[in-house]
Image (cartoon, rainbow, N blue to C red):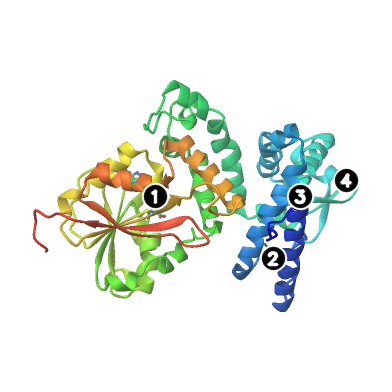
């Protein structure tokens, strides 16, 4: 019997896949009355969720085709393009986007006047950015927005981009130095970031530098654009209703943003938000009046023994900031209050093996993983590493179930406390 396996060269196979998927995408967009993607200033930035399978196929196939056609040096240059942040940083730092009216244009000369940069310097920086689809030149020397520069102009997205250039990048260049200097360290002050910041951790920087603290704080809002990371998603990633009138301690719950979302949607839940003194200070004022009887805030140091008895201990995006040594300490700190039947819910990334999710998403996840290393020797964990972490904290932490949503890696690990020496409460 003849083999049905395709013998077409890979680039032909990819081209066919691209052509097919583009046709399907166009059909779906036109059925919904949506425009075809473009870089036009007012183009909607996100494709609808129900075409994400086509987007995944297209992004991976086009990237593979593109990278197959590059010679090795060009491919390495593409990934090692250390200059990309230069023009992004300059655009944000010199507030160049503010000089371009929405829907209008400005000129290199006007930007030069406003920023004090020579016109040739403006041209050089903006041409570099334009090659990344940030801004466009409508005619020689005349600049207008693209959808990407318009997005970058959102104040908290500019803050994020500036944080990437000025706070993240210097430490990133020192990650390997840190690995060499402190092999396998899990200490939060033995990182690339610390090497680039006179030994300070991000918390140390935030505590002593108001401008950088503002930038960090504002940049954090960008996280809601990452699929699955918006606070509103919390209601859909776990069957909270089954907890009934549970009392939840949200450990490291920041200023209660997630607790508010949960309490708004699940009328029987009562939630205590614990965080460090500096974070929790003044947060009471942000709790809506109608939720005040179900949300409390408490100053609590993560590594100190837990003092509050609850039905559920909920840790959201916390353990990824720590190496195992500190994650184990935080888990063990809960033990004094645990009893059979108690649940520990961990919402954090469950890292996929290579090739399991679309490569374009995998690349982002692996980059974020290295950013965690940069900032605090934190890490994303594979499922077997989560199991190992729980077991090394205490054999009585039993992983009961894991749920990872399709569009995001931010999963929920439901852990039960099993202590056979104590009867059920
Ligand atoms: C990445 S944030 C996650 C916040 C929140 N859980 C969420 O999902 O938005 C980590 C939180 O852990 C808190 N945290 C970190 N180290 C802590 C410590 N040693 N004691 C108390 N809280 C701590 C931080 O203040 C911060 O609010």
Q: Which residue shows up at 52% across the image and 58% down it?
A: 224
Question: Mark 2 and mark 4: span between their CA atoms?
Answer: 27 Å
Q: Residues within 10 Å of mark 4 (few under 14, many from 20)?
A: some
Q: Position of residue 280 (x, y in %)?
A: 34, 52
Question: Mark 3 and mark 1: span between their CA atoms?
Answer: 36 Å
Q: Would you identify the image quadrant in which residue 28 lies?
A: bottom right
Residue tagged 3: 9
User: Comparing marks 3 and 1, which lies closer to the viewer?
Assistant: 3
Image disc number at residue 44:
2
Q: Position of residue 101 (x, y in %)?
A: 76, 57
Question: Mark 1 and mark 4: span between their CA atoms?
Answer: 53 Å
Q: Secondary structure beneath disc 3?
A: loop
Q: Is mark 4 within 8 Å of ligand 1?
A: no
Asked if labels 2 and 3 touch by Cβ distance under 8 angstroms, the answer is: no
**Which numbered disc flags the more N-terminal residue, 1 or 4?**
4
Q: Position of residue 282 (x, y in %)?
A: 35, 55
Residue tagged 4: 141
Residue tagged 1: 383
**Which numbered disc flags the more N-terminal residue, 3 or 2?**
3
**Which numbered disc flags the more N-terminal residue, 2 or 4?**
2
Q: Which residue shows up at 76% across the image and 59% down it?
A: 16
**Which numbered disc flags the more N-terminal residue, 4 or 3?**
3
Residue 255 in view in this figure: yes
- Please give left or right for residue 216 compared with residue 336 in the image: right
In this rendering, the answer to whether 93 lies above or below 220 is: above
Q: Secondary structure beneath disc 2?
A: loop
Image disc number at residue 160:
none
- Please give left or right for residue 342 compared with residue 29 in the image: left
Q: Secondary structure beneath disc 1?
A: helix
User: Comparing marks 1 and 2, which lies closer to the viewer?
Assistant: 1
């Amino acid at each position: 019997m003849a083999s049905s396996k395709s013998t077409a060269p890979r680039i032909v196979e990819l081209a066919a896949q691209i052509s097919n998927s583009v046709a399907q995408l166009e059909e779906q967009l036109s059925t919904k009355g949506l425009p075809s993607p473009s870089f036009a200033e007012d183009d909607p930035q996100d494709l609808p969720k129900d075409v994400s399978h086509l987007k995944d196929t297209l992004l991976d196939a086009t990237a593979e085709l593109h990278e197959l056609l590059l010679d090795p040096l060009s491919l390495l240059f593409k990934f090692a393009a250390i200059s990309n942040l230069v023009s992004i940083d300059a655009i944000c730092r010199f507030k160049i986007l503010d000089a371009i009216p929405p829907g209008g244009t400005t000129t290199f000369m006007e930007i030069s006047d406003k920023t004090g940069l020579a016109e040739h310097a403006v041209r050089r920086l903006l041409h570099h950015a334009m090659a990344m689809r940030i801004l466009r030149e409508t005619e020689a020397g005349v600049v207008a927005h693209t959808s990407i520069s318009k997005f970058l102009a959102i104040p908290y997205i500019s803050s994020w981009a500036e944080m990437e250039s000025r706070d993240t990048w210097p430490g990133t260049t020192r990650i390997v130095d840190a690995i060499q200097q402190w092999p396998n360290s899990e200490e939060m002050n033995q990182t690339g970031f610390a090497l680039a910041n006179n030994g300070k951790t991000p918390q140390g920087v935030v505590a002593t530098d108001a401008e950088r603290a503002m930038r960090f704080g504002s940049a954090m809002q960008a996280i809601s654009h990452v699929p699955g990371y918006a606070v509103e998603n919390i209601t859909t990633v776990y069957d909270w209703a089954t907890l009934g009138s549970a009392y939840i301690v949200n450990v490291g719950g920041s200023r209660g943003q997630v607790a508010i979302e949960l309490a708004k949607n699940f009328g029987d839940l009562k939630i205590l938000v614990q965080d460090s003194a500096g974070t929790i200070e003044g947060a009471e004022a942000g709790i809506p009046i109608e939720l005040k009887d179900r949300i409390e805030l408490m100053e609590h140091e993560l590594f100190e023994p837990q003092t509050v008895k609850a039905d559920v201990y909920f840790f959201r995006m916390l353990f990824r900031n720590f190496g195992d040594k500190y994650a184990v300490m935080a888990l063990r700190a809960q033990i004094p209050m645990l009893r059979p039947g108690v649940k520990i819910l961990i919402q954090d990334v469950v890292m996929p093996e290579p090739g399991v999710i679309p490569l374009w998403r995998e690349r982002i996840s692996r980059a974020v993983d290295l950013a965690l290393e940069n900032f605090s020797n934190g890490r994303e964990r594979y499922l077997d590493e989560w199991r190992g972490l729980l077991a090394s904290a205490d054999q009585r932490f039993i992983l009961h179930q894991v749920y990872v949503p399709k569009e995001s890696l931010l999963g929920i690990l439901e852990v039960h406390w099993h202590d056979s020496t104590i009867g059920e409460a």
